[in-house]
Each structure stands twice: as structure tokens, then as C-alpha cells.
Amino acid sequence: MKTVSCALRNRPHAQRGLTLLVALVVLAALGLLAAWGLKAGGANMRVVGNMQARQQALSAAQSALESTISSAQFSQQPATVAAQPIAVDIDGDGVADITARLSPAPACYRVRIVSLSELDAASAADRPCLRSNAMNSAGIENSTVSSADSLCADSEWNVRAVASDATTGALVSINQGVSLRGLVTDTSNGCP
């Protein structure tokens, strides 16, 4: 019986190598899992960064459209307005981050003369159109005046802004339709 206990005593020493091997395999698997997690996290950060760069370029293009549409030169000299690049500061540090351009130049594609019946005398925007015609149509019956043309016209424009960020490589373009009401003489100068 003594020989059996001696054989049992030697067996645990033989199993220590197997435990070490299992521990190494588990550690290697955990290391691979951690490396995969870091790589997946890095890819997600790149996706989020690209989305942020695109959104900033989109914001810059929208800002360029708004500043163009609100300028007085927009409908009078569209080629001059389009020739100037528009620098946009996204982060507010005083340095232009993204450059936007109007490409192609804003184009007027439709002009429609507004009839007197469409105008509202209570609206401040419509009064310049009514005053001149009201004086010109003195003595004409009311039914004739309502179908007559006013001195105003509606013009419809297509404006396209392209914003590009040299740092991130983001490139975005936006199209915007714009309708303007102005005097027929001013509208005919800006719209061929």
C-alpha cells in the first residue's frame, strides 16, 4: 500500500505544467479581446470624428448661404458675390476654419410680375408696389386696377454653396431655392 501513496504524491507535480499552459491560453485570449476592443473603439472614434467634420462643413455651407441671401448685392450682382470665398469660423477663436464658395454663381431662373390683386395694402413690403400704381391708375375703375400688373415682380433663384475643410478633408454642398420680391426694374437687371 505504501507504493500507491507514493504514486499519488508525485501526480500533483505533473499537473502544474498543465495549469500554467491553461493560464497562458486564457491570458492570450484576454489580450486578443482587449486588442480587438481598442481597435473597435478607435474605429468608432474615427466615425464620430468624420460625422462631426461633415456636420461642421454643413453648418459652414448653411452660414454662407444665409449671409449671401441676406446681402443686398445678392440679386443685383450675383457673379461678384460668387467670386468672393466666404470664411467661416466654427469654434469662435477668430480664425477661419472652413471656406465656403458659391459655385456656380447664384442664378435667377424665373421672374413673375405680381398683379395688384395679389398685394396687401396693410403689408409694409407690398406698399412700394401699390403706391406707384395707385397714382398711375387714378381715374380707372376698380375692376381694371385689380387685374393690372404692379411695379413689383417675384424672382426665383437657385443658390449653391460648397464648403470644404482643409484639415479634415470634409466637402459638403447645399442647394437653396430663394424667392425675392422687388421692383420690376431691379428684377430685370438681375434676371435675364
Image (spheres, helix red, strand yellow):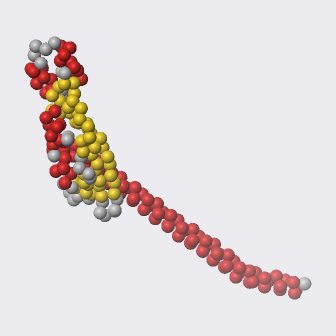
Instruction: Say how many tags the image has.
Output: 0
Percent x, y for residue 191?
20, 40
Which sits in the foreground, 101 or 80? 80
Residue 95 location, quadrant: bottom left
Q: From this viewpoint, is residue 58 visible?
A: yes
Residue 22 location, quadrant: bottom right
Which sits in the foreground, 11 or 71? 71
- The residue sitting at 15% across, 32% down in the picture is 183
Q: From this viewpoint, is residue 60 visible?
A: no
Residue 11 location, quadrant: bottom right
Percent x, y for residue 136?
10, 21
- The residue sitting at 13% across, 35% down in the picture is 185
Percent x, y for residue 155?
23, 36
Does 120 sit left or right of 166 as displayed? left
Rendered view: 174 above or below 29: above
Which sits in the foreground, 168 or 36? 168
Does 146 sit left or right of 164 as displayed? left
